[in-house]
Amino acid sequence: MSLTPPLDRIPVAAAPSATALGIRGSAELGARSGCRKIEGMNTTTTAVKQSGALHTGLDVLEVVSANSSGIGVTNIAAELGADKGNIHRVLRSLADRGYVEQDEHTKLFFPSGSLFRMAGTLLRQQNLAVVAIPFMRALSEELDAPVHLARRLSRGGVYIAREGSSKSGASVETEIGVQPPIHASATGKALFLLATPEELNDLLPGDLERFTDRTISTLDGLWDEISSARRIGYTSDREELNIGVSCVAAPILDYSGAVVGSIGISGLAVVLADGALDHRGRRVSEVAALITERLGGKPLRGT
């Protein structure tokens, strides 16, 4: 069963209709807004021209943004098949608004800080749970198991969402609001998969709490586990937190490359033999990569 929905099939809320907004007709709208038609003015032609200018401006922005080493007016015009004079006027407007800047020596254009700030604002407004839940729901249906989502905190993590259940009834569910131990859970390891030995040493005591006889009990052991997990893109917990329960999890990164969360699946150890656990680990890692991309990040490909 393939994972649905892919990136281009995540549902988007439809815009309200004119009727829903209470707009009964263009004449009434014009009267209420204080607008009137100017005799002799071709409003259709004006709208087309404005639309064309907007498209040209967006085309220019895309070309400039794709050339990090800078690009000149002539090359932009050639790439777009447009008039050089028109492109120059568009660039001047974009520069006036702070979206591009020109090197005074080379005369090349670059994307400006304003453009990066706008992109950063949009990306920061992406809500982790809102983005992740459609993917989690699809993965749960595929693997017939509940999928949990955790958010990274400065000194740990917390479960913030869970989607789906098992039709067979044999599943393990996590509790929202619980903080997973960093060293003894797949989720905790995934949230700190990019941590350094120094960071782990600062976060954890020298003697790690043992939950079962399989719990990792030393920082060196935890570091070895995390280093191995980086190469395959997901972490595992083989009865390290609870006897009879195994888990896999994978990190979610944001646009800055930082781990902001993780998704994971828990199950009965007798059901999740090595092959089944590894299969789920790969699938969880693939879905975490899709969520990462939706958040504007670059998926973890192993180090």
Image: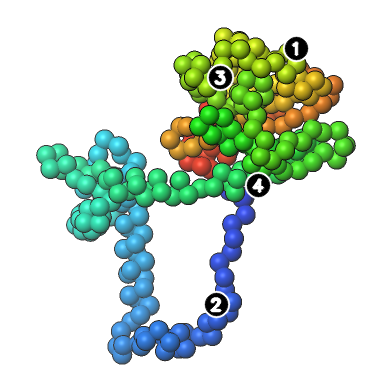
Q: Secondary structure at mark 1?
A: loop
- Asked where in the image residue 285 lies, by quadrant, the reply is top right
Mark closest to the chain's N terminus, 3 or 1: 3
For the residue carrying disc 4, how many other residues have a C-alpha within 10 Å: few (<14), some (14-19), or many (20+)? some
- Kind of residue sitting beneath label 2: Leu
Mark closest to the chain's N terminus, 3 or 2: 2
Comparing 82 with 203, the one in front is 203
| 245 horizontally vs 13: left or right | right
Label 2, label 1: how far apart the Cα atoms are: 63 Å
What is the x, y in percent for residue 247? 72, 26
* Residue at image location 34% in from the left, 62% down from the top: 54
| 153 horizontally vs 5: left or right | left
Label 4, label 1: how far apart the Cα atoms are: 37 Å
Per the image, the residue denoted by label 2 is: 21
Q: Secondary structure at mark 3?
A: loop
Per the image, the residue denoted by label 1 is: 213
The mark closer to the camera, 3 or 2, is 3
**Above or below for 153 versus 15:** above
Mark closest to the chain's N terminus, 2 or 4: 2
- Kind of residue sitting beneath label 4: Pro
